[in-house]
Amino acid sequence: MTTPRLKTLDCQMREILMMRLRADRQVYIDALTSLQERSGRELVKADKLADRARLAYEVAKKKYDEHILNHGCVEHWKYTQ
């Protein structure tokens, strides 16, 4: 039995959504790092920014996951592992 080929391993929308997800993840990581360096009012502001970054990451992750589910494309590495 052979594994059926997926309709698109080079899905452009998947790539765009993955780049957005990676960018939002990095912003979130940077915001969390910034929290460690702040105190007082700066800490409150940094906490709000970190929360917004978290929400943006969660939205990007949801959009990526929904695209994979609805479109049926997957990343190549899932088949090479």
Image (cartoon, helix red, strand yellow):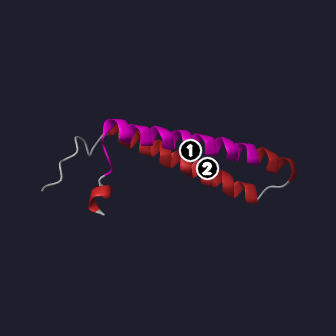
Quadrant location of the C terminus in the rendered image: bottom left
Foreground pick, 77 / 45: 77
Q: Nearer the viewer, residue 37 or 9?
A: 9
Name which residue lies at 70% across and 43% down.
49
Q: Residue at x 56, y 51 (%)?
A: 26
Residue 28: numbered disc: 2
Magenta highlight on residue 68: yes
Other-residue count near label 2 (Cα within 10 Å), few / some / many at <14 / 14–19 / ≥20: many
Q: Which residues are magenta?
A: 47-75
The residue that appears at 32% across and 56% down in the rendered structure is 78
- Magenta: main secondary structure: helix
Q: Which mark is residue 70?
A: none
Please name the amino acid that badge 2 sits on.
Tyr
Give the percent coordinates (x, y) of residue 29.
61, 54
- What is the quadrant of the N terminus in the image? bottom left
Relative to 28, is 16 above or below?
above
Decide: is 22 above or below 56: below
Was residue 77 drawn as part of the magenta stretch in this picture?
no
Disc 1 marks which amino acid?
A: Tyr
> Which quarter of the picture shows residue 33?
bottom right
The reply to whether dot 1 and dot 2 touch (C-beta < 8 Å) is yes
- Label 1, residues with CA under 10 Å away: few <14, some 14-19, many ≥20: many
Identify the element where label 2 is drawn. Answer: helix
Residue pointed to by mark 1: 57
Q: Residue furthest left?
A: 1
In the picture provided, is 46 more to the left or to the right than 28? right
In the image, 29 versus 54, the foreground residue is: 54
Numbered disc 1: secondary structure:
helix
Residue 79 is situated, as x and y percent measured from the top left of the image, at 27, 57
| Residue found 66% across the figure and 41% down from its top | 52
